[in-house]
C-alpha cells in the first residue's frame, strides 16, 4: 500500500502497547518503507522492550515504560508527537471476564487518556485499534472495546478539527496474542492433541501484515470518527485445526472442549445498522460515525430489508476450505519460521 510520504516521513510516531505483535510489525514496516523522525514505544513490559531494543538497534526508537491508565505520564510523552497508533489494551477474553473493571481501566479510561492527551498536544492523527468483539458485544473485552469506539466517535464529534480521530476494526489477527493459532502451534510442538471449542465455530482470519496495512490506510484516508473495516475471509475452527494438522503432519488429533464463557459461535465486523451508513468497496467498509442519514427514508424504501440480518459476519463472509486455509497459513512468517 502506498502511503503519502509526508504523512509519516520525518514525523514523531507514538505506538502505545508497542511491544506486542502489532507494535513489532508496525515498527518493522515503518523502518522498511518509511522514514520517521522518531518512534516512541510506550508499554508496561520491560523485558519485551529489552528484546525489541536488541532486535531493531536503532537510535530512532525511544522506549518508555508506563501505562495508559497513568494520565500524567501519557500527557507528558505526547509532547511533539505527530501521529498516534493506539494498540494498548487488555485483549484476553477470559481475563477480562474475570476482571472486568481492569478492562474498563485500560480499554476505556486508558484510551480516553491517550485521546485527551493527543488533542491537548495538537497531534495530527490518532488511530485506535478495535476488534470484531466490539460488535454486538457479549463479553467484557468486547464491551470495553465498543465503548472505546464510542469514546473515539464522541471525541471526533466535538473536536475542533486540529486532531483527526479514527479507528480500525478487524477480526482474528493470525498468531497475535489471544489468537488460537499460537496455542495450536504450542500443542503441536508438545505433541499433544489440538483443543477446539466447537468445530463449526467460525472466525475471521487476517494476517498481521494485512492488519498493519489497514492501519496505514486509516492514517491516509481516515476521516474524523471513521471506523475502517477490512473485508476478510473466515474459516471454521475445525478446518483451521485440520489445516494445522495437515501442515505439520500432526497425528494426535483434535479434542472438543466446548465453547467458553463470553465466546460467540460467529463474530460480526459490521452491524446491520452500521451497514446503513457505510461506504463500501471491494476490500473495505468505511463506517461514517459522524454522518447523519434519514433512517425513516431508509426503512420505508425497503433497503433495510435487503441488508443481512446479522450484519457482516464470519458466517456470511468468504469461507475458506481446509486447503485454502493451509495456503493462507503457509504465507505467514510464523509458520515459515516454525518449519525451518
Image (cartoon, rainbow, N blue to C red):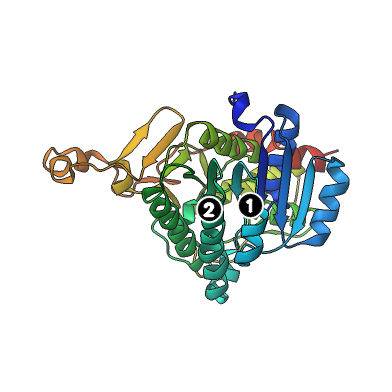
Q: Which residue is mark 2?
A: 120
For mark 2, give the secondary structure.
Answer: helix
The residue carrying pointer 2 sits among few (fewer than 14), some (14 to 19) or many (20 or more) residues within 10 Å by Cα, namely few
Classify residue 244 as left or right of residue 276.
Answer: right
Residue 32 percent coordinates (x, y): 75, 30
**Are circles 2 and 1 on residues that touch, CB within 8 Å?**
yes
Q: Which residue is mark 1?
A: 78
For mark 1, give the secondary structure.
Answer: loop
User: How many labels were placed on the picture?
Assistant: 2
Residue 269 percent coordinates (x, y): 43, 47
Residue 219 percent coordinates (x, y): 54, 36
Residue drawn at 86 percent across, 38 percent down = 340
- Residue 113 falls in image quadrant: bottom right
**Looking at the figure, which quarter contains the N terminus?**
top right
Residue 55 percent coordinates (x, y): 85, 44
- Residue 183 falls in image quadrant: bottom right
Identify which residue, 235 or 176, lies in the foreground.
176
Amino acid at each position: 500500500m502506498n502511503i503519502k510520504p509526508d504523512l509519516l516521513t520525518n514525523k514523531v510516531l507514538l505506538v502505545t502497547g508497542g511491544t506486542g505483535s502489532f507494535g513489532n510489525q508496525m515498527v518493522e514496516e515503518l523502518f522498511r518503507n518509511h522514514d520517521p523522525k522518531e518512534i516512541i514505544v510506550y508499554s508496561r513490559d520491560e523485558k519485551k522492550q529489552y528484546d525489541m531494543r536488541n532486535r531493531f538497534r536503532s537510535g530512532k526508537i525511544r522506549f518508555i515504560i508506563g501505562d495508559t491508565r497513568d494520565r500524567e505520564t501519557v500527557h507528558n510523552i505526547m509532547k511533539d508527537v505527530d501521529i498516534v497508533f493506539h494498540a494498548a489494551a487488555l485483549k484476553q477474553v477470559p481475563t477480562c471476564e474475570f476482571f472486568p473493571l481492569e478492562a474498563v481501566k485500560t480499554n476505556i479510561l486508558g484510551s480516553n487518556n491517550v485521546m485527551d492527551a493527543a488533542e491537548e498536544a495538537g497531534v495530527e492523527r490518532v488511530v485506535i485499534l478495535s476488534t470484531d468483539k466490539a460488535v454486538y458485544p457479549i463479553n467484557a473485552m468486547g464491551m470495553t472495546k465498543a465503548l472505546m469506539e464510542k469514546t473515539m466517535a464522541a471525541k471526533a464529534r466535538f473536536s475542533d478539527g486540529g486532531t483527526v480521530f479514527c479507528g480500525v476494526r478487524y477480526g482474528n489477527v493470525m498468531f497475535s496474542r489471544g489468537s488460537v493459532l499460537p496455542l495450536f502451534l504450542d500443542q503441536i510442538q508438545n505433541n499433544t492433541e489440538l483443543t477446539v471449542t466447537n468445530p463449526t465455530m467460525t472466525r475471521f482470519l487476517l494476517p498481521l501484515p494485512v492488519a498493519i496495512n489497514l492501519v496505514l490506510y486509516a492514517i491516509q484516508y481516515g476521516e474524523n470518527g471513521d471506523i475502517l473495516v477490512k473485508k476478510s475471509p473466515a474459516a471454521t475452527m475445525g478446518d483451521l485445526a485440520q489445516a494445522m494438522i495437515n501442515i505439520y503432519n500432526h497425528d494426535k488429533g483434535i479434542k472438543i472442549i466446548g465453547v467458553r464463557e463470553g465466546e460467540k459461535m460467529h463474530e460480526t465486523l459490521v452491524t446491520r445498522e452500521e451497514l446503513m451508513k457505510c461506504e463500501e468497496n471491494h476490500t473495505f467498509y468505511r463506517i461514517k460515525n459522524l454522518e447523519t442519514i434519514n433512517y425513516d427514508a431508509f426503512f420505508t424504501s425497503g433497503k433495510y430489508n435487503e441488508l443481512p440480518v446479522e450484519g457482516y459476519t464470519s458466517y456470511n463472509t468468504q469461507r475458506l476450505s481446509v486447503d485454502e486455509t493451509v495456503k493462507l497459513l503457509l504465507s505467514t512468517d510464523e509458520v515459515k519460521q516454525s518449519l525451518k
